[in-house]
Image (cartoon, grey):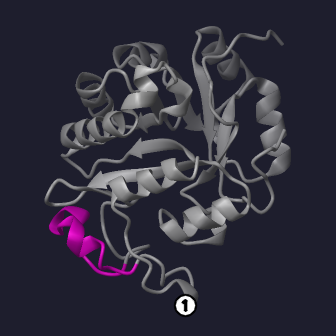
């Protein structure tokens, strides 16, 4: 198998949504659990509340991981921050709040945690979400970006091409990645349109040939969500650069 140089300059293993299966997702409790286990790299999700303030959440609706009903955009950020985002996981986590994006990102930066920020727009809010997240990320890492230390800056990823286009327009200096569950025939054209540096894809749909194709084209290759150590080794053998995992108890940050 040919070996191609990679554009990936980031950690190899990321804790999925903070603490994987060991803590409530997308919370500071999850982030602390990842830190406790040695993780200094994280993937998490960001969407906008009704007032345009970004919060750390995966679902556009309440009821699965956040107590309540309705949609994220039915609430202001301060209202969401008062809702319980931990009780669904365990009684010990009852009252864990929905994090505000800025505070969550600042905590990560202060603790040396590298971030893959997934832009997760609620339906119809692609442009606003992409632009807002990119603007804040650029401000938080302005010094690192100015110094050319781009590997310290976060990587913005999204399934939404509109969100990535908006991020590029607002803050072209912040690196971007295209999220695609399954790589379509025109994946490279889409990546070029948003000037992405990496492709993020579901490992279940990846093949050795596709992995080689992505690497040969000069893109970094990241997979989600890999929870079996044997599968992780197989993917790395195909040329996958990095992956996120829920099983931070089985796959450590220095896995190889």
Residue 175 seen in render: no
Vertical placement of 233 versus 166: above or below?
Answer: below
Q: Residues within 10 Å of mark 1 (few under 14, many from 20)?
A: few
- Is residue 8 found inside the magenta-colored segment of the image? no
| Residue found 17% across the figure and 67% down from its top | 76
Residue 201 seen in render: yes
Indicate the secondary structure of the residue bearing disc 1. Answer: helix
Q: What stretch is highlighted in magenta?
A: 67-84
Residue 50: x, y in percent? 15, 60
Q: Name the residue under label 1.
A: 91
| Residue found 57% across the figure and 17% down from its top | 219
Q: Which residue occupies the foreground of this view, 202 or 249?
A: 249
Residue 227: x, y in percent? 73, 53
| Residue found 69% across the figure and 28% down from its top | 241
Residue 232: x, y in percent? 78, 42
| Residue found 58% across the figure and 48% down from its top | 113
- Res 18 → quadrant: bottom right
Relative to 196, 34 lies left or right? right
Relative to 198, 189 lies left or right? left
Vertical placement of 6 versus 232: above or below?
Answer: above
Query: Residue placed farthest to the bottom in the image?
Result: 91
Quadrant containing the N terminus in the rendered view: top right
Q: Which residue occupies the foreground of this view, 162 or 57?
A: 57
């Amino acid at each position: 198998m040919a070996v191609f140089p990679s554009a990936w300059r980031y950690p190899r293993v990321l804790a999925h949504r903070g603490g994987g299966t060991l803590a409530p997702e997308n919370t500071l409790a999850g982030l602390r659990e990842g830190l406790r286990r040695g993780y200094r790299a994280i993937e998490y999700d960001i969407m906008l509340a009704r007032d345009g303030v970004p919060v750390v959440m995966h679902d556009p609706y309440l009821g699965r991981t956040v107590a309540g009903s309705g949609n994220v955009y039915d609430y202001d950020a301060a209202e969401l921050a008062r809702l319980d985002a931990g009780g669904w996981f365990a009684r010990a986590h009852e009252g864990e709040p929905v994090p505000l994006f800025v505070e969550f990102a600042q905590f990560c930066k202060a603790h040396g945690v590298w971030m893959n920020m997934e832009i997760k727009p609620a339906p119809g809010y692609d442009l606003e979400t992409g632009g807002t997240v990119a603007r804040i990320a650029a401000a938080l890492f302005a010094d690192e970006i100015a110094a050319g230390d781009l590997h310290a800056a976060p990587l913005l990823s999204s399934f939404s091409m509109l969100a990535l286009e908006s991020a590029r327009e607002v803050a072209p200096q912040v690196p971007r990645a295209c999220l695609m569950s399954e790589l379509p025939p025109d994946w490279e054209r889409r990546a070029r349109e948003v000037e992405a540096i990496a492709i993020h894809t579901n490992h279940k749909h990846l093949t050795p040939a596709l992995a080689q194709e992505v690497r040969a084209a000069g893109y970094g290759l990241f997979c989600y969500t890999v929870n079996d150590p044997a599968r992780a080794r197989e993917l790395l053998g195909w040329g996958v650069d990095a992956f996120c995992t829920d099983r931070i108890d089985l796959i450590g940050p220095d896995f190889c």
